[in-house]
Amino acid sequence: MTFRTSIRMLQVTVLLGLSAPLVAQAGPVFQPGTGTVSSPVLPAEPEGDAATPAVEAPVVAPAPKPKVATRKGPVDGLKPGQFVWEKHDAYVGPLKIVAVLDIQRLYVFQNDKLIGFSTISAGKKGKETPTGYFNILQKNIDHKSNLYSNAPMPFMQRLTWDGIAIHGGHIPGYPASHGCIRLPHAFAKALFDVTQMEQEVVVLQNFATPVKRPEPKPVPVIDPPVVAPVTPEVTPPASPPKPAA
């Protein structure tokens, strides 16, 4: 699968997920199979004598609201452990990293352009990956877990101090970690190489459930230290030498 094909599939997926069902309205009408847009056909005004008594229109029950079909199937063409990464000589500009838990995907944007996305394996039931805004607190190429029997966590990027991180690992196709976000090893390395400390990472449960950005922490006001006044030390002048007898 080429990167451009994957991008087109992803764009279709997002548009289908965000599109609301259309309701009948007086607007342009797309003609299937012709590629043209025409004006809607509105009912003509009834003709007749102005003195003709008006006929009360029958009461018609409102039409039922259309049901929104739930789209099923994969969100893209990636199989577990696969990813797409657009390689550049240099990566310049702000990064955005977004993980979506219900579809087990992680997306990387640079300058608001998608440069990569990957399958992931997030926290399993009982060890769910927390959602919210996080910052990369620590980076370690060859980290070993101090909670789970020195389990290898290559290209680790810590999100919390209580054990949540992004790192390379096994991607079985479903949530299987203890809360971390596992990535394919090659993708974990590529991401590790372009991120900086304090890089923001957003973890969503799904596209429809936003997370609240934490309030910025107030800058503490530090009073200047109180310096005690220093009394200058005065050295008395030396006594003149006594004349020789």
Image (cartoon, rainbow, N blue to C red):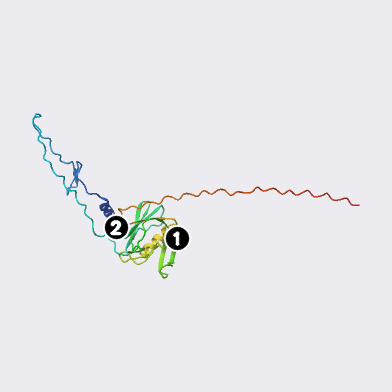
Image position, residue 177 (x, y; %): 35, 65
Q: How far apart are marks 1 and 2 (CA)?
A: 31 Å
The answer to whether residue 43 is above or below residue 215 is: above
Q: Residue 6 carries which label?
A: 2
- Residue positioned 41% across, 58% down in the render: 194
Image position, residue 126 (x, y; %): 34, 64
The answer to whether residue 146 is above or below residue 11 is: below
- The kind of residue tagged 1 is Gln
Callout 2 secondary element: helix
Nearer the observer, disc 1 or disc 2? 1
Q: How crowded is mark 1: few (under 14 residues within 10 Å), some or many (20 or more)?
A: some
Image position, residue 116 (x, y; %): 34, 58
Q: Name the quarter where the N terminus is drawn.
A: bottom left
> In the displayed image of the protein, which residue is found farthest to the right?
245
* Image quadrant assignment for residue 159: bottom left
Q: Which mark is residue 195?
A: none
Callout 1 secondary element: strand
Residue tagged 1? 138
